[in-house]
Image (cartoon, coloured by chain):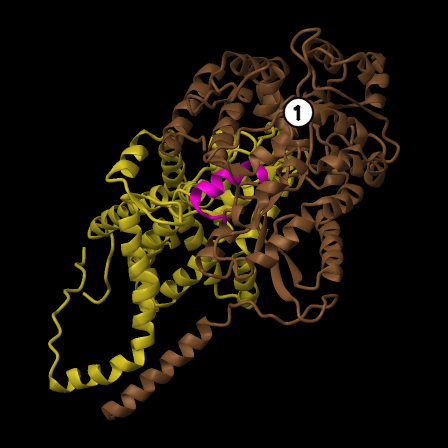
Chain colours: A brown, B yellow
Amino acid sequence: MTLLPGRALKASLISLVVVVCACGGGGQTAAPLPGCNAGTSQVLFWTSHTPPDTTSMQHMVDAFNKQSTTSCVKMVAVPGSETDIAKLTTAVRGGTGPDVYELDRFTVAERAAAGVLEDLTPFGAASESSNYLDFAWKEALFKGKPYALPFDTDARALFYNKDLLQAAGVDASALDISKGAPTIDMIRTMANKLNKKDASGKYTTIGFVPWLSQGWHYTWGFAYGGSFFNASACKVTPDDPKIVQAFKDMFYDWSGALGVNAVQTFVSTYAPTTPALPTEQDAFLTGHIGFVVTGPWVLSWFPQYQPNLHYGITYIPVPHQGDTPATWAGGWSVVIPKGAKNSKGGYEFMKYFAGEPGQRVYTKETQHMPTWKTLLTDNSLYQGDLGLFVKLLPTAHSRPALPVGSLFWDQLSTAQDAATRQSQDPATALKAVAATTNDKLSQYCPLAA
Amino acid sequence: MIAAPRLRRVRLNEQDWRNLRTALPFIAPWIIGFLAFTVYPIVYSLYLSFTHYSGFGDATAAGLANYQHMAKDPLFWQSLNNTLYYTALAVPIGVVVAIALALMMNQNVREVAIYRAAFYLPSIIPLFALTFIFIVLLNPGFGFVDYVLGLFKIPAVNWLGDARWTRLSVVLLAQLGAGGPALIFLAGLRAVPSELYESAVLDGAGPLRRFYKITLPLISPVILFDLIYGTILGIQIFTPAFVLAGGTSGGGAYTAGPENSLLFYVFYLYKNAFQYSDMGYASAMAWVLFVISVVLALAIMRSSRYWVHYEAN
C-alpha cells in the first residue's frame, strides 16, 4: 500500500507532536503550596542533605512561607554531595534548575569559576558581609564578588571514651580541656594501651586511628602549622615541609606502628568509609576506638544511640608541648544557580534561610553552629558541649577557597591514602599533588579581584 | 573452518525507492531524535575535547592541551589500567559463567523452569542494590565469604579494603549479572540441531567431546556477540565503583577505593565532568575511550575468523 504524500506528511507531523509532547512537561508549576500566602510566586530550593537536617530545614521553609507575602518555597531533596553536583549541572543546562541550591561553601569559588552560579552583587549581597564570620564570608567570594550567603559551620576536636580509658587503667584527667591541648606523644601512649586483638590476631579495639572520621589531611596539616596555599604565587603548597611531616607522623608512621594490613582490616570491619556503616554502628559509639577527631554533629548521636557513654572532648593534639592548638571549620552555603526562574524570590528566601531567623532554628535543632555573628553570643542556643566548639571558632582555619577545590581535596585524599597504606612516601605523594593541582589552577590565576 | 557469509550489495528499484519515501516520514521522529540526541552530542563532544569548558559560558580553544594533559595525568593511566584489568578478567570469566548457566538451564528435567528463574534472578536485581549486598557479604570481620574461607582454614581477605583484592571483588560481583547473557546462550544452545548430537552419540562421542566438537563451534557466533558486547560494557563500568567508592564524609570525598583501585575510566571521566567542572577534559577522555572500544571490538572481530563458525556455510 502506498500512502499519498499529504497523508504521509500528516502522519509524520502527528508522530512528531507525540514525541515533542512526551519530551515536554518538565517545567515548574506555580501551583500554590499548603502554608503559602495567596499571590506568592514559587521558589524551588534544592538540598542534598538528608534527615534529620532536612527536617529542620523544612521547619525553616515553613516559617518563611508563613511570613512571606511574595514568595513560596518548595524544598526538594536531590542526589549530590559536598563535591558532586551532577544533578545541579545537568538540570541548569536543561533549563530546569532550582532557584536556590545548598552548596558546600568551600566549593563556591570553584562553581563560580565554572559559571554555574549567579553573582549576588546586583541583589546587594555585599552589604551582608559584616553579619557573617570573616572566614565564612571569604569562602563565599570569587574574585572579590559574593556568589553565596554562608549558612552553618563546624569545627573539629578530639573526642575520647572515658570508659575505655578507665578500663585500661589510663588516667583521663590529663585530657581535661582546661589543661590545654594534649601532645601527640601523650595521645599515642594512652591510645596504645587500648589496643586489643582477638584470637585470630585481628584488632577488635584500637586506641586511635588518626585518619578516621575528621582526621583529614587538612586536620593534621593545620595541626602541624602547615599552609596549603600561597595566595601571592597562586599556587597550592601541599609539599610544605610541615604538611609532609604531619603526613609522615600521623599517617605513614602511625599506620606502620599498628601494622598496615592489620589496621586496614580493622577499618574495613568497624569503620568502613565507602559506604559508611549506619550511625548506630559508628566505631566510637560502639567502643571499638578510644579517640577520634570529629565535629559537633556527633553530639546529637550520643543521647539517641549511646546515652550511657562517658566521653570527653579536648583540642586536637599538637606536635609539641605548648604549641597553639588548631582546628578547621567547614560548612554550607546557599546560592542562586544560573538560569534561576525566580532569582529575586530566591534571594529573599536566602536572606531568611542563611540569616538570623533561619540559622537560629538550625542551630537549635541540629547542633550545627551558625556563621551569623550575633548568634554566636546567644548562649541559650548552645546546649551541652556545643559551647566548646563555639569557643574554637575564632581561631579555626578554613580550607583555601580555590577554583580547583574539589580536585585539590581529592588529590590530598589520594596522598593521604597512599601514606596510610605506605604505598608511597608522603613527600613524593604530596609533590605529585602540587604538580597536578597547580597545572589545573594556573588557568584561573591570578585569583585576586 | 567455515567462512562468514559474504555480504551482497542491495540495489533498490523504483518501487523500493517509493516505499522508502513513504516510510521515511514515519520513522522521521526517530531519525530526528537520533540526530539531535546521539549524533549531535557525539560531534559536539569532539569539538569540546579541543577546548577548556566548564559546562557553562563559552568554551575556550585549548588545541591538544586536554589530550596532552591526559598523557601526563597519573590518574588517567591508573583508571585505564583498572578498567582494562577489570575487562580482561570479567568478560572471559563472564562468558564461561554464562555458558555454564545456559547449559544448566538447558537440561531436560521437569523443574527446569524453576532453575531458569533462579539463575536469572540476580540479573534483575538492580546493580546498585546488588553492590550493597556484596559489601555485607565481603566484610572481613563478619562477612559470609570470609566465614566460609575460614572453615577451610583460609586466612580472611580484606576484599574491599585492600587494593590487591578490590578489582577482583568487582569482577566477582559482575558474575551475578551473568543471567542475561546466559539467556542468549540458551537460545543458541536450543538452535543446535539435535541430530548432530544423536549422530555423535552413535559414533561413540562422550559428553565432553560433544560439547567441544558440536556445542562450542555452533554457539561461537553467540560467544562473539557476547565478547564484543561484554567488552564494550566492561570498559564502561561505573555503578559498582560509584557505590563502593563514591562516598563522602563531612567535608569531602574519599579516594575511589583503596589507592584509587576502583577508579575506573568512566568514573574518573564523571568526576572530571561533574566534580571538577572540566567538560573539555572529560570529552577528550570519552573520545579516547571510544577509540579504545573500536580497537578492541575490531581486534575481537578480526580474531573471530579463526574461531567463529557460521552454520549457514
| Residue in the picture at 34% in, 83% down | A13
- In the picture as drawn, the residue positioned furthest to the right comes out as A308
Residue A73 in which image quadrant: bottom right
Q: Which residues are magenta?
A: A103-118
* Residue B117, x across and y down, in percent: 55, 63
Query: Where, by quadrant of the figure, is residue A359 drawn?
Result: top right
Query: Which quadrant of the figure contains the N terminus of chain A?
Result: bottom left
Q: Is residue A227 above or below residue B34?
A: above
Location of residue A384 in the rendering, given as x and y in whole percent from the top left corner:
85, 32
Task: Quickly name the residue at label 1.
Answer: A396
Name the subunit of mark 1.
A
Residue A119, how many percent across, how many down?
A: 50, 46
- Per the image, label 1 sits on a secondary structure element best described as loop
Front residue (pair B188, A81): A81
A147 relative to B271 in the view: left or right? right
- What residue do we see at 48% from left, 43% from top? A111
Residue A371, compared with residue A325, is above or below; it is: below
Residue B154 % position (x, y): 59, 29
- Above or below: residue A111 compared with residue A423: below
Inspect this view and state whether residue B125 appears.
no
* Amino acid type assigned to the residue bearing label 1 in the image: Ala
Residue at image location 39% in from the left, 40% down from the top: B83
Please state which of residues A386 and A64 is positioned toward the viewer in this rendering. A64
Question: Which residue shows up at 58% across the image and 39% down it?
Answer: A105
Frontmost residue, B260 versus B287: B287
